[in-house]
Amino acid sequence: QVLIEFDNVQKVYPNGTVGLKDINLKLYKGEFVAVVGLSGAGKSTLLRTINRMHDITGGDLKVNGQSIVGYKGKNLRNLRRSIGMIFQDFNLVNRSSVRRNVLSGRVGYYSTWKSSLGLFSAEDKKRAVQALDRVNMTEKIYTRVDQLSGGQQQRVAIARALMQDPQIMLADEPIASLDPLTTTAVMDDLLNLNKELGITVLANLHSVPLAMKYADRIVGLRDGQLVYDKPIAEVKEED
Ligand code: ADP
Ligand code: ADP
């Protein structure tokens, strides 16, 4: 079942830089896709078009069979809620607790004054505990984020993304600032979401060996173009 479809997608940034060129790509529900390529190849741009953090400038992009290009208001909010995202630098609020950070994944569901006062529903508090449990971080629930290691922070970021019950998880260089040991913990968490919750994962990775270990499929970009696309079983060393 096709979940995300790039149909001749172009992305030219306002300053004229080409982010993506002629991208044709179908991603299927339940896949774990690694996007590889050098820095500046367009990996981050590719991910960010899917949740409309960046708007494409040509072609069409469909999620669940519907073009998201013209989405506004409620449609756009729903699209973004169905897509979780994590970043290289975690994007957490450092001076807040793990709990507050994770609950902030539900902020879009509350009026601003309620969430600013920390008035979350019992159900969402329960959901937060469950999300932390999934990444083995429940013991740290009251710890301040700046007292955690990078790997632990990334797992908190995953838990925050899970609060939206996402259908898709976008991971933009999720392990680029982590050491090898915590890299494994974070990648294992992503694999767990993929296999146990059925969340489709798209991860930008620099490391091809890591992509081969975790992904079902490897997509390669160079200078904004799709230059490689193979299921893991067909990936060869010399590629
Ligand atoms: P991240 O690396 O955290 O994904 P960005 O998405 O901001 O950061 O940037 C991704 C890449 O695009 C970086 O290599 C950055 O140098 C480049 N970049 C970001 N903004 C601009 C810009 N306004 N003009 C040119 N290049 C940019
Ligand atoms: P990657 O994630 O593979 O490192 P990016 O998607 O960040 O690549 O960047 C692709 C190209 O688009 C690069 O040339 C980058 O500098 C440029 N770019 C990224 N973000 C911006 C931006 N906001 N404005 C202008 N150019 C950008």
Image: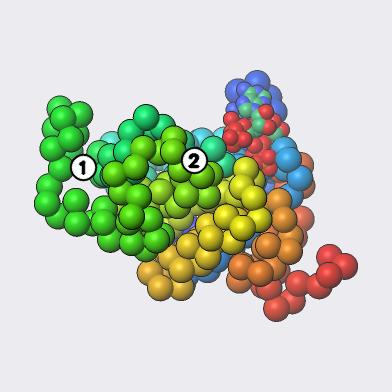
Q: Which image quadrant: the C terminus?
A: bottom right
Report, in whole angstroms, how far the alpha carbon at label 2 lies from the one at label 1: 21 Å
Observer-nearest of 196 and 26: 196
Residues at discs 2 and 1 in contact (Cβ within 8 Å)? no
Please tell me how crowded label 2 is: few (under 14), some (14-19), or many (20+) other residues with Cα within 10 Å.
Answer: many
Q: Residue at label 2?
A: 90
Sequence-first disc among 2 and 1: 2
Front-lying residue, 193 or 101 = 101
* Residue type (three-letter) at the residue carrying disc 2: Phe
Question: Residue 136 at what x, y percent from top left?
Answer: 39, 61
Q: Is residue 23 left or right of residue 5?
A: right
Q: Is residue 20 something one can see in this rendering? A: no
At 72% from the left edge and 56% from the top edge, which residue is drawn? Answer: 207
Name the residue: 33% across, 61% down: 133
Q: Is residue 40 above or below residue 156?
A: above
Q: Amino acid at mark 1?
A: Tyr
Q: Which mark is residue 2?
A: none
Image coordinates for residue 213, horizontal then vertical, percent: 66, 69
Answer above or below: position of 203 versus 144. Answer: below
**Which disc, if any, is residue 109?**
1
The x and y percentages for residue 38 are 76, 45
